[in-house]
Image (tube, rainbow, N blue to C red):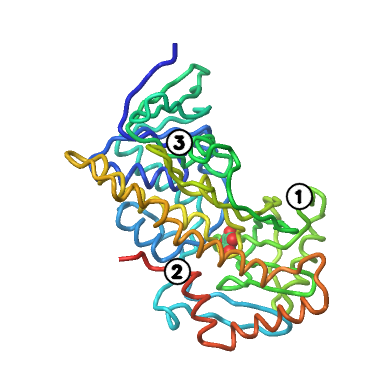
Amino acid sequence: MPTTVRTRVAVVGAGPAGLVLSQLLADAGIESIVVDSRSRSEIESTIRAGILEQNTVDLLRAIDPGTRVDTVGHRHDGIELRFGDEAHRIDFPALVGRSVWLYPQHEVLKDLLALRLGAGQDLRFGVTVAGVDEGDPEHPAVVGTDAQGEAVRIEADFVVGADGSRSAVRATVTGSRSGGYFREYPFAWFGILCEAPPSAQELIYSNSEQGFALISQRSPEVQRMYFQCDPDADATAPSEAEIWDTLQARVPGTTLHEGRIIQRDVLRFRSFVAHELRRGRVALVGDAAHTVPPTGAKGMNLAIADVVLLAEALRALLAEGARDERLIDSYAERALDRIWKAQHFSWWMTSMLHVAPDATDFDRRRQLGELRSVVESEAGRTYLAEAYTGWPARA
Ligand code: DHB
């Protein structure tokens, strides 16, 4: 017999989405249990993207007095787009009055875990979820095994899948683990962390003849950089010298500060949106509901935007004396509005900046025409700035 526990909301996944959701629910007086298959140290050391939209930063400041986004993070007021031998700065505050913050996801997670554990959140690591039992549709149950290998059953009034792109909850909502709209890309990113001073003050997104490169930062001592590679590339294959030669060739005009490479990985990417985001009393948020290619760093921001909508809907449904179903009924539609805009933006940045393996001379020249029509037009720059810094929440 499994150990059975009861809660109001069972949240699968202690990433940014699951943790922010548990905080917003607690603020509304709604109890939750959060489970994750990983350990706390695994969660805190997973290297992901580093850019937070203005909306995300405003929310973190509002929910977490201890957030380090303003002390460890850095505000960025623009990015640089490079192509041909041109460099163009997109000035966010001048165009849209908003900014972004460079603050890596694992630092956000350290803050959020400290916040939730400090508040006494029931947060269980090492729990592998097998699925959701909907025997009683009003009280779905998360079933799985805990860190000791014992069967667990968490009965709730609502279940949320915030468990990433390989979600165990998704099948309950969509009818299959994969059911969704998706597209793949014929390239991936080779990512490095290196011990070196920053090579630029702001991010450089470079479309070069040899392919895309992104120069990002982490701290005064550690930098993050990426270059377009084959999806089947082996992260261990190139020497450090080969990696630096590749990166350097793709950002002509800037001399990169080189240093010891302390981490390397190949990020395969695809675009995905689940066919359904909610069924009955089970809903999906974040990567469980959708994934975007990394160009433009929308992933975590989109996850948090989903959570803001879902928390509002769960408050209406579950808070003392509430039982208002209107917001949960419109959750998917309202979330999809931003999700598809972000899907478009991420696809657009990706296709505009990468060189497809089968690109013809026509394709290359058209792409440079596209880049020029963005940077030379205030309307073009404004669209990029608006999407990159994040669309304001709908009133
Ligand atoms: C980073 C990642 C991105 O995908 C991006 O568009 C910008 C920055 C990063 O890891 O720093």
Q: Nearer the viewer, residue 105 or 133?
A: 133
- Badge 1 element: loop
- Residue type of the residue flagged with mark 2: Arg
* Residue at 57 percent of width and 37 percent of height: 176
Q: Which residue is mark 2?
A: 75
Q: Nearer the viewer, mark 2 or mark 3?
A: 3
Quadrant hosting residue 177 = top right
Sequence order check: which comes first, mark 2 or mark 3? 3
Residue 62 image position (x, y, % from top left): 30, 57
Give whichever of 78, 392 is nearer the camera. 392
Residue 322 location in percent, x, y? Answer: 20, 42
**Amino acid type, residue under disc 1 in the picture:** Ala
Give the crowd class for mark 2: few <14, some 14-19, many >=20 residues within 10 Å. Answer: some
CB atoms of marks 2 and 1 within 8 Å: no
Q: Which numbered disc, 2 or 1, marks the residue that appears first in the sequence?
A: 2
Figure check: 35 above or below 144:
below
Name the residue furthest top: 1
Percent position (x, y) of residue 50? Answer: 53, 59
Residue for badge 1 = 235
Between the residue at mark 2 and the residue at mark 3, the CA separation in whole angstroms equals 31 Å
**Mark 1 and 3 residues: CB-CB less than 8 Å, in contact?**
no
Relative side of 392 to 38, left or right: left
- Dividing the picture into quadrants, the one containing residue 343 is bottom right
Q: Which residue is mark 3?
A: 12
Residue sitting at x 50%, y 18%: 148
Q: CA distance from mark 2 to mark 1?
A: 31 Å
Within-10-Å neighbours for mark 3: few <14, some 14–19, many 20+? many
The numbered mark, 1 or 3, whose residue comes first in the sequence reads 3
